[in-house]
Image (spheres, rainbow, N blue to C red):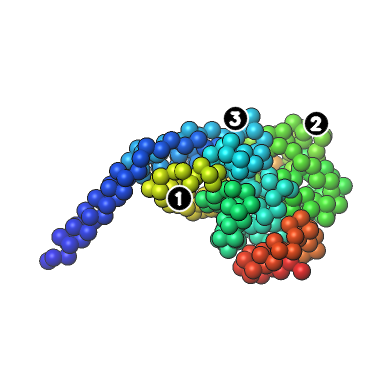
Amino acid sequence: MKTKPILATALAVGMIAGHAAAEDIPKTELNVVGSIGILSMYKDMEEPFWNKTIVESSGGAITANLKPFNELGFKGGELFSLVSKGTVQMAHQVLAYTSGSVPENEATDLVGVVADVEAVHKAAKAFRDYHAGFLAEKHNIKLLGYGTYQSQVVYCREAFGALADLKGRKVRASGASQQVFVEHLGGSPIGMAFGEVPTAMANGTIDCAITGALSGFLAKWHEPANYVSAVPINHGVIAHIANMDWWNGVDPAAQAAIESGLMALEEKMFALAVTETADGLSCNTGGACKYGEAADMTLVPASDADMALMADAAVTAVLPAYKERCGAECAAAWNKTIGDAMGFEIK
């Protein structure tokens, strides 16, 4: 008979404690640069989090001025340096955009190592502590969590039947390991901003391009491209980052609210990426599509030969190139974290 009153009392105490915690947070206004504004990562995840979730959970104490990087005139990669210097307080950084200058930022999403979204999250969790320490020490950046786009796939204007057929083609690749992979196949990797791809493919500057299965659909890559592969090349991990000097000046109660909120957002982002891979391929190839009218691209199914090629590329090209870019110490840290978790070793 006493169970219900005791439970009710416990719930009431919890609600009071939560309300008190929110009341303890001082008014805190943030400036946040988001990811690509036309994509679901921003519209369905980042925008609701900063404009609603964090506001409500903090009792209105925390508010954010949020804009996607493409609407601010950025290409994306420069955000990392701007956060490091304190020019930008916080950002959702697409890590592949910085892989040339900061190889550690691509560690969780190397081509051929992570076969699906769940594997990427496993790799990110294994690497989190090392990555956080590295960013703090070397770049004056606070790591507050991860997220990911859906699986990155190949879009091409002309027909191809397997990944090996990319030999001799000009392929837009957004990160260092994608570039190594394309070179390994005998293709020519091209660095290019996301928004420039449709025009470049239409006019023949590039033959193919790699991006998320749904991201490409939402950006209308299906207009110049006619074929899409189902093979997951990698995924497109992002990091929620803040300038360390600025972060250290934020009230501890506000810090705690932001950190816990972004960790919850991480789980939602990875869960969304799982479904969006299938949704993107369906939308591109005439299937069910809740994001608009489906396109009529031809699907190039994954084959055993494709998957064997991916595994071989990881061992013979991608991992050795990663070690060359980041050094022996970095490679050893990768082996002890992601390598142990995923069953790979950089020699």
Q: Residues within 10 Å of mark 2 (few under 14, many from 20)?
A: few
Q: Could you tell me the amino acid type at mark 3? A: Glu
- Quarter of the image for residue 218 reads top right
Task: Indicate the position of residue 43 as horizontal and vertical percent values.
Answer: 51, 38
Q: Which residue is mark 3?
A: 71
Write the residue at 58% across / 36% down.
87
Nearer to us: label 1 or label 2: 1
**Dot placed on the residue nearer the N-terminal end, 3 or 2:** 3
Q: Residues within 10 Å of mark 1 (few under 14, many from 20)?
A: some
Q: CA distance from mark 3 to mark 2?
A: 25 Å
Above or below residue 319? Residue 63 is above
Write the residue at 19% across / 57% down.
8
Q: Secondary structure at mark 1?
A: helix
Q: Nearer the viewer, residue 279 or 56?
A: 56
| Residue 327 seen in the current view | yes
Q: Residues within 10 Å of mark 3 (few under 14, many from 20)?
A: some
Q: Nearer the viewer, residue 156 or 339?
A: 339
On residue 259, the disc is 1
Q: Could you tell me the amino acid type at mark 2? A: Asn
Q: Could you tell me the amino acid type at mark 1? A: Glu
Q: Which residue is mark 2?
A: 203
- Quarter of the image for residue 315 reads bottom right
Q: CA distance from mark 1 to mark 3?
A: 26 Å
